Image (cartoon, rainbow, N blue to C red):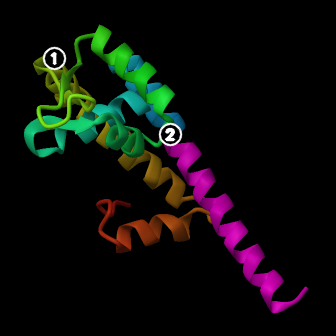
């Protein structure tokens, strides 16, 4: 195996580790958010992304990127959240073809109720992952980036 092959394997191993950490966290978040708030992780992600926008709205294409979904999956998700009165769609004043999504008051309330669950599960999942030797360096890297508070 040459140096180039070693580099490929190191990147692949890093990607597998990242995917394992992501899967562990997402599974825990999915279970807790569904059980306690009737929200999926991606629904929470959309509500959270919308809450961080000035003016509280985003174009559908921006929302698709924020949620890492295709256009059609984003449309289906927005339909579900709109049916639950958690967000609404608004025509863009500048471009009638453009559609914005915006949180409703119910959406802000749901997000406010779900955020502590999300944050606590994330904290516990990262702490648990820190105990697994193969995941510990990645968790440490996240803490070093100040992306998450360091615990344990």
Q: Residue at x 91, y 85 (%)?
A: 1
Q: Residue at x 40, y 38 (%)?
A: 64
Q: Position of residue 97 (x, y in %)?
A: 27, 29
Q: CA distance from mark 2 to mark 1?
A: 24 Å
> In the rendered view, does 146 fall on the left or right side of 72?
left
Q: Quadrant of the C terminus?
A: bottom left
Q: Looking at the magenta stretch, what is its main secondary structure?
A: helix
> In the picture shown, does residue 85 fall above or below 105?
above
In-image side of 90 versus 60 (left or right): left
Give the labeled residue for mark 2.
26
In this picture, is 9 found above or below 87? below
SS for callout 2: helix
Residue placed furthest toward the right:
1
- Give the label, 2 or 1, closer to the camera: 1
Q: Residue at position x 21%, y 22% from top?
A: 110
Q: Residues within 10 Å of mark 1 (few under 14, many from 20)?
A: few
First of labels 2, 1 by sequence position: 2
Numbered range of the magenta stretch: 1-26
Q: Position of residue 23 (x, y in %)?
A: 58, 44
Left or right of residue 139, residue 102 in this image:
left
* Side of 55 relative to 2 (left or right): left
Q: Which residue is mark 1?
A: 106
Dot 1: what SS?
helix
Q: Nearer the viewer, residue 129 or 82?
A: 82
Residue at 33% across, 34% down:
60
């Amino acid at each position: 195996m040459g140096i180039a092959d070693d580099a490929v394997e190191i990147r692949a191993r890093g990607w597998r580790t990242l995917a394992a950490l992501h899967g562990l966290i997402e599974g825990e978040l999915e279970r807790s958010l569904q059980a306690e708030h009737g929200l999926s992780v991606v629904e929470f992600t959309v509500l959270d992304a919308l809450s961080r926008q000035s003016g509280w709205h985003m174009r559908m294409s921006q929302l698709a990127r924020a949620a890492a979904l295709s256009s059609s999956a984003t449309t289906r998700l927005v339909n579900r959240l709109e049916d639950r009165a958690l967000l609404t769609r608004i025509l863009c004043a500048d471009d009638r073809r453009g559609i914005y999504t915006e949180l409703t008051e119910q959406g802000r309330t749901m997000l406010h109720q779900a955020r502590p669950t999300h944050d606590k599960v994330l904290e516990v999942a990262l702490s648990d992952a820190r105990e697994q030797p193969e995941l510990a360096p990645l968790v440490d890297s996240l803490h070093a980036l100040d992306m998450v508070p360091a615990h344990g």
